Image (cartoon, helix red, strand yellow):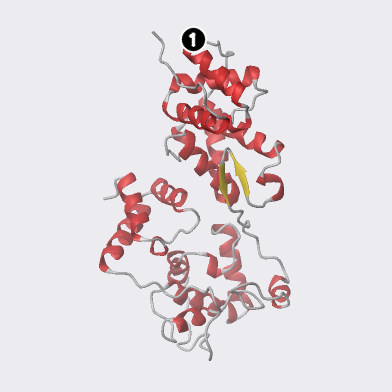
């Protein structure tokens, strides 16, 4: 006797939620939904895009035990799968919006598995179909603003920009934004001042100041940092946008001198919204060190943390419960 799927006398939202749950938990139902949506629903696989009548019809189809034959898929070669997996990984690094969409899609439909290499080709293709339908449906992809895809809403985030010639001079003429003074982000010493007025050795702000001081030593040093950022850091030249460990590696490997002790110290309070150096208790510090060691163990493990953390790569910038959640989820030693 076929499994029975409740679906009678439910509104559209409840039906869509039920179909999504079936997609997550029932392989047979997920496959049948894909065929049903492609055949009778114009290829739209997001349940929230269909009427209550359409969703009820799908559940009735499941309850009847009648199998809808799927079209014969093309044979997936290992080379094609590797190419698609590589494309997904590259896009996660290049596009914050893509990375967010992938993370949410994997949480909803992929059992929380974020590594594309651990999914089959049909899952990757369905994700691409999801992106395409969202774009054609006028989702956030077109405007870059806050949007909703598949019933999930997240804020838009600006993409990283490569520094262009003259960008520094242009930035100085820009009006101030909320929490950021005119001319861009504050010097590292201004962060440190919020916690006591001086740079804290070993903090991210210290290494930001170290790199910025190095840039100011001369054109050769400034060009050196720019070339390094272009080659190894995806063209992101603003030291403020990198983790302290990344900046420290550059400084250690290239003999960058320490910043002056009074770097950036000014009178008056720092701008609103600027983060102070992090103060951690012993419990959180242990969690942070475990995750950092996990990241360093392999490139794949580092990528696992980057996919989990949502764009804030420094573990110290996260609360202890989130760190513990990652440690538990991935069995971090």
Viewer-side residue, 153 vs 223: 153
Counting labels gives 1
Residue 173 in picture, x, y percent from top left = 73, 77
Q: Is residue 288 above or below residue 116?
A: below
- The residue lying toward the viewer, choosing from 268 and 294, is 268
Is residue 195 shown left or right of residue 40? Answer: left
Which corner quadrant holds the N terminus?
top left
Q: Position of residue 231 (x, y in %)?
A: 57, 58
Figure check: 260 above or below 176: below
Residue at the extreme bottom of the image, as rendered? 267
Residue 295 shows in the view: yes
Residue designated by label 1: 64
Residue sitting nearer the eye, 97 or 134: 134
Q: Is residue 258 visible?
A: no
Residue at the image point whose x is 70% and y is 37% from the top:
137
The structure residue drawn at horizontal position 33% and vertical position 45%, both measured from the top left corner, is: 329
Q: Position of residue 211 (x, y in %)?
A: 52, 74
Residue density around tag 1, few if under 14, some if 14–19, many if 20 or more, within 10 Å: some
From the viewer's side, name the closer residue of 73 and 62: 62
Residue at the extreme front: 9
What residue do we see at 33% from left, 70% from top? 280
Element type where label 1 sits in the image: helix
Image position of 216 with respect to 123: above or below: below
- 45, above or below 307, in the image: above
* Residue 255 image point, x, y percent: 46, 74
């Amino acid at each position: 006797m076929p499994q029975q799927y409740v679906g009678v006398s439910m509104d559209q939202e409840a039906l869509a939620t039920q179909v999504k749950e079936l997609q997550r938990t029932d392989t047979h139902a997920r496959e049948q939904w894909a065929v049903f949506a492609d055949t009778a629903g114009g290829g739209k696989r997001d349940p929230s895009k269909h009427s209550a009548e359409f969703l009820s019809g799908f559940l009735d189809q499941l309850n009847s035990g009648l199998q809808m034959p799927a079209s014969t898929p093309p044979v997936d070669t290992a080379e094609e799968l590797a190419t698609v997996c590589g494309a997904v990984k590259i896009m996660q690094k290049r596009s914050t919006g893509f990375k967010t969409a992938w993370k949410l899609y994997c949480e909803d439909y992929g059992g929380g598995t974020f590594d594309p290499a651990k999914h089959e080709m049909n899952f990757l293709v369905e994700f691409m179909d999801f992106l395409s339908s969202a774009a054609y449906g006028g989702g956030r992809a077109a405007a870059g603003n806050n949007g909703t895809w598949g019933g999930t809403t997240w804020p838009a985030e600006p993409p990283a920009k490569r520094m262009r010639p003259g960008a520094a001079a242009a930035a100085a003429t820009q009006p101030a934004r909320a929490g950021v003074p005119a001319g861009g982000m504050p010097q590292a010493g201004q962060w440190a001042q919020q916690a006591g007025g001086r740079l804290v050795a070993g903090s991210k702000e210290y290494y930001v100041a170290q790199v910025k001081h190095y840039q100011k030593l001369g054109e050769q040093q400034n060009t050196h940092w720019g070339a390094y950022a272009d080659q190894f850091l995806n063209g992101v030249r603003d030291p403020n946008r990198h983790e302290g460990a990344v900046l420290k590696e550059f400084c250690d490997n290239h003999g960058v001198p320490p910043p002056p002790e009074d770097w950036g110290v000014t009178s008056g309070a720092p701008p609103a919204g600027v983060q102070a150096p992090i103060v951690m208790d012993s419990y959180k510090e242990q969690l942070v060190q475990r995750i950092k060691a996990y990241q360093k163990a392999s490139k794949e493990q580092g990528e696992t943390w980057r996919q989990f953390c949502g764009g804030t790569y420094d573990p110290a910038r996260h609360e202890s419960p989130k760190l513990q959640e990652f440690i538990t989820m991935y069995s971090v030693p």
